[in-house]
Image (cartoon, coloured by chain):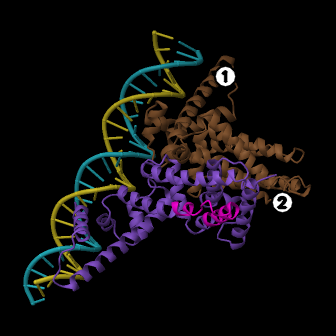
Chain colours: A brown, B purple, C cyan, D yellow
Amino acid sequence: MTVRKLRSKRDATLDSPIKSRRVATDVAKERRLRQIELKRGAIMDAALDVFSRYGVHGTSLDQVAIQADVSKTNLLYYFPSKEALYVNVLRQLLEVWLKPLQSFSVEQDPIEAIAEYIRVKLTLSRDHPAESRLFCLEIVQGAPLLLTELQQPLHDIVQNKVAVIRAWVQEGKLASVDPYHLIFSLWAVTQHYADFRAQVEAVSGKTLDDPEFFAETLQNLQDLILNGIRPRS
Amino acid sequence: MTVRKLRSKRDATLDSPIKSRRVATDVAKERRLRQIELKRGAIMDAALDVFSRYGVHGTSLDQVAIQADVSKTNLLYYFPSKEALYVNVLRQLLEVWLKPLQSFSVEQDPIEAIAEYIRVKLTLSRDHPAESRLFCLEIVQGAPLLLTELQQPLHDIVQNKVAVIRAWVQEGKLASVDPYHLIFSLWAVTQHYADFRAQVEAVSGKTLDDPEFFAETLQNLQDLILNGIRPRS
DNA sequence: TTTTATTTTTACCAAATGGTCTATATCGGA
DNA sequence: TCCGATATAGACCATTTGGTAAAAATAAAA
């Protein structure tokens, strides 16, 4: 109810800006909206962090609230329910997540393009581990919420890149790899360092936060994959 | 308490078999023990399944009980607590999980050995997806329970295999890859098909259950990795 | 058959938790 | 300074859920 109120208010200001007699009013309203977005953002950041660590079900709203430095009731003023909060977090995460794939196109040199893709994805694994983990958790559990709205755009963009890779293969610029499996492998090896960080650390004693280890990992993954797909006489 | 009772009883029968005047008694006792293990096994199977789907926190004991076709209280008769059940499931899982790595040794041909390892791991991903998912969930969340007892054996066995791979490299049988990253990559690409099954299916429309897709996946992964590490002049 | 040990069920409890309702504080505008 | 709207907090509630106590049922032993 409270949220319904909030929603309708915000929608109202967004959809039909009141023809204000004074500019001052509008400015203030906008500032307030920014404030709201700021606070919502802070809550979502906190939520992303704890959700990705303990899972959605393993996290209480109180935990999120504390982490975001607000009261639970106040949190529920900004998000109608735990699920709504979670969905918002997931949706925001998706944007970060699908962006890197956009990049490569037929004109590029495949070796360079893929090397760069590995670099970008590995950087993402280092700098956005929470996003990586939460995405992983959601997908592992069948992505009940994500899949419906992920399926279409993901399918489309992958389809697109599959065509690009296929073209590269046909032009003899790559060994004959199945584009799907190449993409899956790229995802797998790069995200592994974020998602399985605990294991990586247990085994090797290092994480991507160590610059040397990061560089070494990048080098190895690029070598492995690129040698794996370089056209062979 | 109830469990303590159960425990002590079982321990007693295991540690100091009562010098029975009759064989019949022992036989009966053994049969009962088998029954207990059977029931515990059934409960653990059910638990593995639901835990891996909804996460530990997302699963209630009632769900597990229903899946195992026992009452919740009855379940708690066989396992002292939810956590105890979970730990048992994890421990059992570990055995299945660490086995494949044991296999390769210096005498083998590295290309064959690694091809076989990929095959085994991919088969595991197909036939034991629940184990793969639960392991993934646990590790992603920092493996609070697993890590303590996983760390040592995992570290040891990996250390061992690292030495093997390093020897292969030194003998010129492999390109100069870092053994750690090779192992991580092998894990990543094979487990991906189980853990990210939802995504793989959303993108490609197929799963490892499809024999054709399985074969194709295996072929591609082997090609990719093996070409990636084959010694190049 | 009687007795004893073990397994299963029934009723119940206490804590945690998502969420609501109401009161209060705060802030922008007049 | 006053007022209306927005934001925050506090008390509270209903449900879920892990777990217990005790009784009932079943199986084993004597």
Could you tell me which residue is drawn at 80 percent across and 54 percent down? A229
Could you tell me which residue is drawn at 31 percent across and 68 percent down? B74
Amino acid type at mark 1: Asp
Question: Mark 2 sits on what residue?
Answer: A176
Could you tell me which residue is drawn at 80 percent across and 59 percent down? A177
For residue A7, say whether it is visible. Answer: yes
Q: Nearer the viewer, residue A3 or A51?
A: A51
For residue A88, say whether it is visible. Answer: no
Mark 2: give few (<14), some (14-19) or many (20+) Cα within 10 Å.
some
Where is residue B25 drawn, in percent x and y?
21, 82
Confirm whether the magenta stretch covers residue B141.
no
Q: Main secondary structure of the magenta part?
A: helix
Question: Mark 1 sits on what residue?
Answer: A26
The residue range painted magenta reads B98-121
Q: Is residue A196 above or below residue A49?
A: below
Amino acid type at mark 2: Ser
Ranked by sequence position, the earlier of labels 1 and 2 is: 1
Q: Quadrant of the N terminus of chain B?
A: bottom left
Pinpoint the chain carrying mark 1. A
Quarter residue A162 falls in: bottom right
Where is residue D12 drawn, in percent x and y?
31, 41
Confirm whether the magenta stretch covers residue B103.
yes
